[in-house]
Image (cartoon, helix red, strand yellow):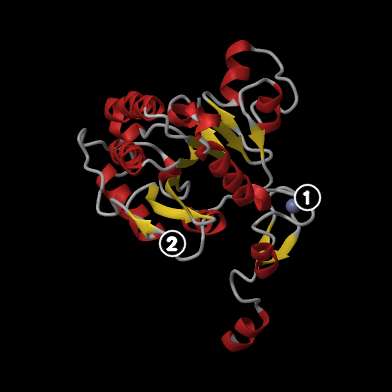
Amino acid sequence: MAKIKSEKKAPQGLFKKCPKCDYSIYSKELEENLWVCPKCNYYFRLDSRRRLDLLIDKGTFKEHDSNLTATDPLKFEDRISYTKRLDQYKNKTNLNEAVLSGEAAIADSKIIISILDFSFMGGSMGAVVGEKICRAIDRAIKFRVPLILVSSSGGARMQEGIVSLMQMAKTSAAISRLSEERIPYFSLMCDPTSGGVSASYAMLGDVNISEPGALIAFAGPRVIKQTINEELPPGFQRAEFLLDHGMLDMVVERDNLRETFKKLIVFFSDKENRQ
Ligand SMILES: [Zn+2]
C-alpha cells in the first residue's frame, strides 16, 4: 500500500504554488524565470545565496565574517529561549546569521556586498547583522570599491532589545563615513524591507532601488490603518508608490538587476559623476 501511495505522489518540491494567483509552477521553470510567477508576475522571495547568484559574476564571491554569531545579552525568552531559537534557525537555514557578506565582482568590477536573508529570523537586524554591515562598509572604504546592500527584513531583532536598536545608529553612522569618502553605495530593497532596517541604512543609498511590488515601510499598513483610522490609498507602501512619491530612485525588474548594477558601477566610477 505504502509503495503505491508514494509512487502516485509527485516528488516533493517539484511544483511550487504561487501565493498570489495559486498557479502551480514547475520548480525548474520557476527557477529559469528567476523565481517570478510566469502567470501573474509575483516575485517569490529569494534566499541570500540565490540573490547572490543573480547579481554577481559566477565564482567570484569570497565570504567575510562567516564566523560571527549572536550572543544572548538579555537572556531573552518568549515561548523558547533566544539561544534555542537561534539554533533552530541555524539548523533550518544552514546560515549562521541573517546576513551574508563578502566581496565579489559584477562585470569584472570588484564590489563589497551584504545580503539579508529573510529566512533567518525574518532578516532581522541584531548586533551581528549590524556589525557585519559595518565591516562591509569599512571594507568598501578600504578597497575603495562600490558597496551593495540588499535588504529584506522585518526590522530590528526584538530578542536583542536596545542592542538591536543601536544597530540603526551604528550602521547609519558608518554609511555617513562611506559618503564622506565618496564611495558609492547602492541599496536594493526587496520584499519586505521594514522597521529598523528601512529606517536606517537601507534608505540611505546613493541610489535606492527596489523590485516591483516590494513592501517598503517603517510601520506596516495594518498598524497605520488602525492608528489613523482611515482607509489607505491603493498601493500604499509598495515600491511603485514610493517611487511616485520620491522615496526611491528606481524600480527594477529582477532580470534587469545585474545589468542595472553594472551600469551604475561604471557611471559612479567616473570621478566626474561623483562630484
Ligand atoms: Zn502567480
Q: Is residue 225 left or right of residue 154?
A: right
Q: Is mark 1 within 8 Å of ligand 1?
A: yes
Residue at 56%, 43% (x, y): give it. 266
The outermost residue toward the right is 39
Q: Position of residue 214 (x, y in %)?
A: 63, 38
Residue 81 visible in the snapshot: no
- The three-letter amino acid code for the residue at tag 2 is Thr
Q: Is residue 77 left or right of residue 260?
A: left
Distance from disc 2 to disc 1, alpha carbons, whole Å, reads 33 Å
**Nearest to the observer: residue 183 or residue 219:** 183
Q: Residue 92: where, in percent of width, then height?
A: 40, 59
Tell how many labels: 2
Question: Dot 2, crowdedness within 10 Å: few (<14), some or many (≥20)?
Answer: some
Outermost residue on the front side: it is 272
Q: Earlier in the sequence, mark 2 or mark 1?
A: 1
**Front in this rendered view, residue 127 or 182:** 182
In the picture shown, does residue 87 fall above or below 147? Answer: below
Q: Residue at x 25, y 49 (%)?
A: 68
Q: Secondary structure at mark 2?
A: loop
Q: Amino acid at mark 1?
A: Cys
Give the residue pinned by disc 2: 60
Locate residue 104 relative to residue 28 in the image: left or right.
left
Question: In this figure, which residue is indicated by the disc labeled 1?
Answer: 40
Residue 218 screen position, x and y as percent = 52, 24
SS of the residue under disc 1:
loop
Can you tell which quarter of the image residue 94 is in?
Answer: bottom left
The mark closer to the camera, 2 or 1, is 2
Q: Is residue 240 visible?
A: yes
Residue drawn at 50 percent across, 25 percent down: 275
Q: Quadrant of residue 162?
A: top left
Q: Is residue 36 above or below residue 272?
A: below
